[in-house]
């Protein structure tokens, strides 16, 4: 009887941790990827898989932490919202991020939820944000040029492989694609562009893991879970993201704000 009570108490505590503690225990991971003068770095912050539902203290904490990091650019790498009626909430969150330049790409949930892409693009435009769907955006940061190649989502959209061959003129170049499984499906002919970094999300780091092993990952994840990978095409970082999907829990996969000094 005592053993059963102990197990029941333990399971209750673990459940409370997964619902109330870990989803709000935000990790900031900083990655030094500089190859030149230490004074010339460009700071890029990645926010992935926000799955924004409401503007709570959690979302405001994310915005506050991002602002404190003083990024040169923020990248929203897909699944920012997963319901049609969350554009007003997104509006409030974007306002909290302030005037830092921001680019965004689409994730699978923007497709699966039938989000009005015209309205979403207008919302982003209202905040000075560029939504990149198989497009390139260029930024002059101090005396360097930063090019962001934003691909459509691999799981639900149609990424343009030809953008791997875009003429980026020796600039610092970052490619963003929501679903990391894409990087296992690229045809050899695309492998000609030397990107400094590729960014993805989608996996939520497994969202629920046991000793670091994900119980389940969504289609389009490929063999990736989270962290930095050396792929044939580029150094790929897969963010654990910030929100939750399907179940409102996280266990062994803390929400993440990823920071890159390039």
Image (spheres, helix red, strand yellow):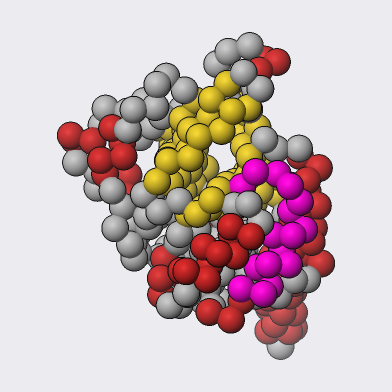
The answer to whether residue 2 is seen in the rendering is yes
Q: Which residues are magenta?
A: 87-102
The foreground one among 196 and 215 is: 196
* Residue at horizontal 76 percent and vertical 37 percent from the top: 70
Q: How many marks?
A: 0
Q: Position of residue 123 (x, y in %)?
A: 60, 65
* Image quarter in which the C terminus is found: top right
The foreground one among 36 and 103 is: 103
Q: Please name the predominant secondary structure of the magenta segment in the image.
A: helix
The answer to whether residue 22 is seen in the rendering is no
Q: Position of residue 30 (x, y in %)?
A: 66, 35
Above or below: residue 126 compared with residue 82: above
Q: In the visual, does 118 lie left or right of 46?
A: left
Q: Magenta span has 50?
A: no
Q: Quadrant of residue 187?
A: top left
The foreground one among 202 and 101 is: 101
Q: Position of residue 87 (x, y in %)?
A: 61, 73
* Residue at horizontal 75 percent and vertical 71 percent from the top: 55
Residue at the bottom extreme, as displayed: 1
* Residue at horizontal 42 percent and vertical 19 percent from the top: 170
The foreground one among 246 and 21 is: 246
Q: In the visual, does 91 lie left or right of 237?
A: right
């Amino acid at each position: 009887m005592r053993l059963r009570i102990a197990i029941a108490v333990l399971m209750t505590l673990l459940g409370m941790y997964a619902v109330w503690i870990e989803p709000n225990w935000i990790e900031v991971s900083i990655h030094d990827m500089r190859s030149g003068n230490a004074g010339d770095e460009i700071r890029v912050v990645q926010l992935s898989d926000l799955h924004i539902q409401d503007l709570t203290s959690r979302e405001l904490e994310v915005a506050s932490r991002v602002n404190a990091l003083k990024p040169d650019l923020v990248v929203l790498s897909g699944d920012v919202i997963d319901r049609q009626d969350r554009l007003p909430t997104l509006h409030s969150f974007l306002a909290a991020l302030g005037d830092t330049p921001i680019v965004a790409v689409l994730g699978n949930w923007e497709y699966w939820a039938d989000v009005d892409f015209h309205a979403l693009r207008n919302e982003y435009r209202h905040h000075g944000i560029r939504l990149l769907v198989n497009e390139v955006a260029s930024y002059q940061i101090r005396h360097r040029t930063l090019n962001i190649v934003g691909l459509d989502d691999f799981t639900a959209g149609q990424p343009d492989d030809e953008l791997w061959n875009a003429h980026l003129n020796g600039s610092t170049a970052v490619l963003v694609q929501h679903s990391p499984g894409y990087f296992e499906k690229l045809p050899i002919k695309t492998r000609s562009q030397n990107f400094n970094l590729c960014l993805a999300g989608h996996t939520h780091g497994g969202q629920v893991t046991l000793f670091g092993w994900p119980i389940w990952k969504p289609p389009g994840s490929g063999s990736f879970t989270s962290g930095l990978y050396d792929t044939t095409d580029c150094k790929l970082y897969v963010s654990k993201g910030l929100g939750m999907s399907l179940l409102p829990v996280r266990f062994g996969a803390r929400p993440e704000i990823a920071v890159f000094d390039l």
